[in-house]
Amino acid sequence: TQLLEQSPQFLSIQEGENLTVYCNSSSVFSSLQWYRQEPGEGPVLLVTVVTGGEVKKLKRLTFQFGDARKDSSLHITAAQPGDTGLYLCAGIQGAQKLVFGQGTRLTINP
Amino acid sequence: IAGITQAPTSQILAAGRRMTLRCTQDMRHNAMYWYRQDLGLGLRLIHYSNTAGTTGKGEVPDGYSVSRANTDDFPLTLASAVPSQTSVYFCASSLLRLAAKLGELFFGEGSRLTVL
């Protein structure tokens, strides 16, 4: 059982469309992170959200932390082929364990 | 620009053999981690180290061991490899020890290990 459940696991859309990826848990997290991973590379941090209800924007990407700090979402506006990749959410469990969701593999078709 | 260097990039290994994956960072980060990444399971923590001389167990530590003799190096050893250890292994580091507030993890490019 995954502590952090991401949905959908796979998403393929056309360039210019909007999309939302979700990261859900039954546990409360003090903060959550979103990483993006490209083939053959390690994940790279996109954002950290720390306050319930917080919204952060990174160009066309909007990240939201749920009010109860159990879930987060990533919304991409006008997706571009360069957005293609594996998107991972991560949160702290216990004193030292950063746990990851299983990831959402996003493909943007030209 | 270096950051985190992992070696080897890829390795095919016979079951029962011993294997050490190397990880070196040049950012003087205190904390280092080893994750394995498997399709549908995401990244799972194997072992971590908060500082040189200390290590701790993650979610899936069985069959793996680590050491942290100095700040820069954090090797991962498979004493007797089994096919279920076929995976992509990522080493990561962070400046601060993970606590209530998350610091950024910096990842290497991964080591793809196949155990036959």
Image: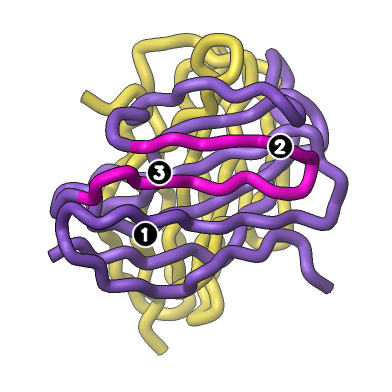
Chain colours: A yellow, B purple
Instruction: List the residue tagged with mark 3.
Output: B43
Instruction: List the residue tagged with mark 1.
Output: B88
Instruction: List the residue tagged with mark 2.
Output: B69
Tell me the amino acid under the disc marked 3. Answer: Leu
Q: Is residue B19 magenta?
A: no
Image quadrant holding the N terminus of chain A, namely top left
* Whether marks 3 and 1 lie on the same chain: yes
Label 1 environment density (alpha carbons within 10 Å; few <14, some 14–19, many ≥20): many
The image position of residue A56, as x and y in percent, is 71, 40
The image position of residue B94, as x and y in percent, is 74, 39
Q: Where does the magenta region start and end?
A: B64-81
Label 2 environment density (alpha carbons within 10 Å; few <14, some 14–19, many ≥20): few
Outermost bottom residue: A110
Q: Residue, x 29% and y 70% (percent of image)?
A: A12
From the viewer's perspective, tell me whether residue B63 is left or right of residue B35: left
Marks 3 and 1, the one that precedes in the sequence: 3
Image quadrant holding the C terminus of chain A, namely bottom left
SS at mark 2?
loop
